[in-house]
Image (cartoon, rainbow, N blue to C red):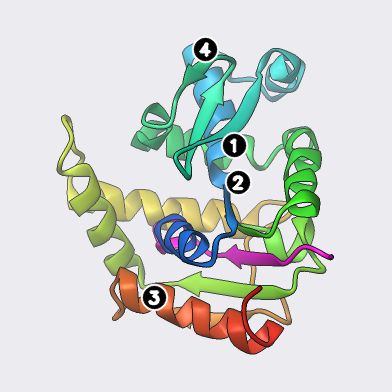
């Protein structure tokens, strides 16, 4: 039986990961956080002080990234080290925007993402899932929210940790990352022509997940 593929794209801080993770859990699908893969490569480059694009490409062979599942939760590994928390730091987010614009980095991760989608019912989120990674996905959703609301959500998340940046810093980072992601030459952030637009500015997590489930059911005639 053909596997069901759901592609969720959208800008940083729109709630893609939280919403996709919850929806996948409720439907019994595998959740694939493609942003985590790019963040892990970015973390490796930061930790090894690799900044030049040619050097980043040359180092890809040493950067072993994988997704593993424990008790239904996705964990991200760099070689044998669990970096699921480390990759959420603001400086890694900005570095991920840079490395994700490099064609060789995207090619490096593309086969891993496609393989997961071929073997499992998946909800995969990112920036170019519906346009590049899974252009034939059964369901495509473009998830967004206002920059101010996205900054507010990220600030609440990071305020629980040490060295939390200010709301203004987070907002500026989001605006800058939006600009970088939408204007990069390779696989820019954009809504696929056949994607359903969902604005979560005024929705909480449960409401957003319910909206996504409703769209999935309408597209595939119920969940399998």
Write down the residue under mark 4: 49
Which comes sooner in the sequence, label 4 or label 2?
Answer: 2
Identify whether 105 is placed above or below 135.
Answer: above
Where residue 26 sits in the image (x, y, percent)?
Answer: 46, 65
**Which quadrant of the structure image shows residue 99?**
top right
Where residue 216 sits in the image (x, y, percent)?
Answer: 60, 79
The quadrant of the rendering that contains the C terminus is bottom right
| C-alpha separation, residue under disc 1 versus residue under disc 3 | 24 Å
Q: Secondary structure at mark 1?
A: helix
Give the camera-side residue of 196 and 139: 139
Identify whether 32 is placed above or below 22.
Answer: above
Which comes sooner in the sequence, label 1 or label 3?
Answer: 1
Image mark for residue 208: 3
Q: Is residue 11 inside the magenta stretch?
A: yes
**Residue located at (59% from left, 36% from top):** 37
Q: Residues within 10 Å of mark 1 (few under 14, many from 20)?
A: many
The quadrant of the rendering that contains the N terminus is bottom right
| Tag 2 and tag 1, C-beta contact below 8 Å | yes
Write down the residue under mark 2: 34
Which comes sooner in the sequence, label 4 or label 3?
Answer: 4
What is the number of callouts on the image? 4
| C-alpha separation, residue under disc 2 versus residue under disc 1 | 5 Å
**Residue located at (82% from left, 69% from top):** 136
For discs 4 and 3, the disc positioned in front in the rendered view: 3
């Amino acid at each position: 039986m053909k596997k069901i593929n759901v592609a969720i794209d959208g800008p940083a801080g729109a709630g893609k990961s939280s919403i996709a993770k919850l929806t996948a859990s409720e439907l019994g699908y595998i959740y694939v956080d493609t942003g985590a893969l790019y963040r892990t490569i970015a973390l490796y480059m930061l930790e090894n002080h690799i900044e030049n694009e040619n050097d980043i490409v040359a180092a890809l062979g040493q950067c072993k990234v994988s997704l593993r599942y424990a008790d239904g939760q996705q964990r991200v590994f760099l070689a044998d080290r669990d970096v699921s928390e480390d990759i959420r730091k603001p400086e890694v987010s900005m570095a991920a925007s840079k490395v994700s614009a490099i064609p060789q980095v995207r090619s490096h991760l593309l086969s891993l993402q496609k393989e997961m989608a071929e073997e499992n019912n998946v909800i995969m989120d990112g920036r170019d899932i519906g346009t590049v990674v899974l252009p034939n996905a059964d369901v495509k959703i473009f998830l967004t929210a206002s920059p101010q609301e996205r900054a507010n959500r990220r600030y609440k998340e990071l305020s629980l940790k040490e060295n939390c940046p200010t709301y203004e810093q987070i907002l500026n980072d989001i605006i800058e990352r939006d600009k970088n992601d939408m204007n990069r030459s390779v696989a820019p952030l954009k809504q696929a022509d056949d994607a359903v637009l969902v604005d979560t500015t005024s929705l909480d997590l449960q409401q957003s997940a319910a909206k996504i489930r409703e769209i999935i059911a309408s597209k595939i005639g119920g969940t399998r």
